Image: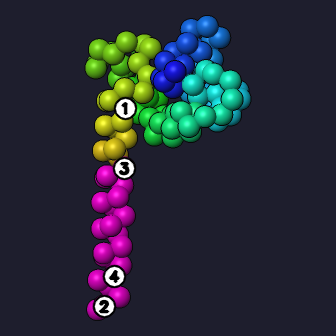
Amino acid sequence: MHWAECAKISETAFGQSRFTWPEYGWSGFNCESGLSISDITGGIAWLWTYPSDYLLRLPAVASFLELQPDHVGGNLSGFITFGVAALVGLFVKGVLDDMAFHRQT
């Protein structure tokens, strides 16, 4: 089972928040027993979309974007995280380039 589907089931059936690390650690990301490769990729996806999902679940943001309350790990979450990561990367690159320029002068 895909990790986002598992998160929705966990929220509905057990009241577990999407923002809570699974009770069984890495092996809890696909709602199946045992650790598998889908648990690892699910954990990475969970970490990648966590900040964006949190932002998109804020009532004002969700209302403005007309999102359903059960929105979890969609393309928009990945896109927002990618955009933020790109901006942070450009900022760090600019700082490092500036530091290198000042060392040369």
- The quadrant of the rendering that contains the C terminus is bottom left
**Magenta residue span:** 85-105
Name the residue nearer the viewer: 33 or 58: 33
Considering only vertical position in the picture, is 25 above or below 56? below
Asked whether the beta carbons under mark 4 and mark 3 sit within 8 Å of each other, the answer is no
Quadrant position of residue 16: top right
The tag on residue 85 is 3
Measure the C-alpha gap from mark 2 to mark 1.
Answer: 41 Å
Residue, x 68% and y 24% (percent of image)?
A: 33
Asked whether the beta carbons under mark 4 and mark 1 sit within 8 Å of each other, the answer is no
Q: Amino acid at mark 4?
A: Ala
> Which residue position holds label 4?
100
> Which residue position holds label 2?
104
Q: Amino acid at mark 1?
A: Ser
Pair 2/1: label in front: 1
Q: Amino acid at mark 2?
A: Gln
Q: Amino acid at mark 3?
A: Ala
Measure the C-alpha gap from mark 4 to mark 3.
Answer: 22 Å
Measure the C-alpha gap from mark 1 to mark 3.
Answer: 12 Å
Residue, x 55% and y 12% (percent of image)?
A: 9
Q: Is residue 9 magenta?
A: no
Q: Residues within 10 Å of mark 1 (few under 14, many from 20)?
A: many
Measure the C-alpha gap from mark 4 to mark 1.
Answer: 35 Å
Q: Is residue 5 visible?
A: yes
Residue, x 31% and y 52% (percent of image)?
A: 87
Give the residue furthest to the top. 13
